[in-house]
Image (cartoon, rainbow, N blue to C red):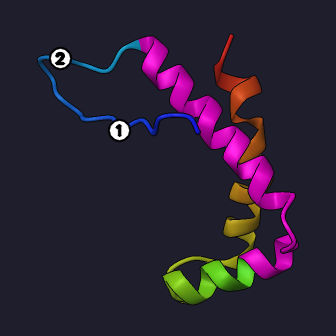
Amino acid sequence: MEKQIKIVKDEFNPESTELLAKSIIQVSEASKSLLGSGLNQRALIVLLLDMIGAGKITKSQIKLVLDNLPRLRAWYIK
């Protein structure tokens, strides 16, 4: 199992580019695994709406985020 990364914001000792890149890759890969699990996207949206509260965020906003999380690596890692 790979070591979990914890990023601490500090203006005097900022995060390294490599650390940020690795974190983006981990989020992208985790979202692919989540979307490839037994739950479909609709079920994930319902669960997230229940956790967050329906008045604070819309289904379309959640869908937009879920659709784009797997693409983070392609967009930000060169």
Three-letter amino acid code at the position of disc 1: Lys
Q: Quadrant of the N terminus?
A: top right
Question: Magenta span: helix, strand or loop, mainly?
Answer: helix
In this rendering, the answer to whether 62 lies above or below 8 is: below
The residue lying at 69 percent from left, 34 percent from top is 72
Q: Which residue is mark 2?
A: 13
Q: Quadrant of the C terminus?
A: top right
Of residues 3 and 24, which is closer to you in this image? 3
* Neighbour tally class for label 2: few under 14, some 14-19, many 20 plus, Cα within 10 Å: few
Position of 15 with respect to 67 (left or right) is left
Please give the range of residues in magenta: 17-44
Q: Can you tell which quarter of the image residue 7 is in?
A: top left
Return the x and y of residue 63 as percentages of the image width and height.
Answer: 76, 65
In this rendering, the answer to whether 9 lies above or below 52 is: above
Of residues 1 and 69, which is closer to you in this image? 1
Return the x and y of residue 76 as percentages of the image width and height.
Answer: 64, 22
Earlier in the chain: of badge 2 and badge 1, it is 1
**Furthest-front residue in this view:** 1
Task: Calculate the distance from the C-alpha at mark 2 to the C-alpha at mark 1.
Answer: 14 Å
The residue lying at 82 percent from left, 59 percent from top is 35
In this rendering, the answer to whether 78 lies above or below 60 is: above
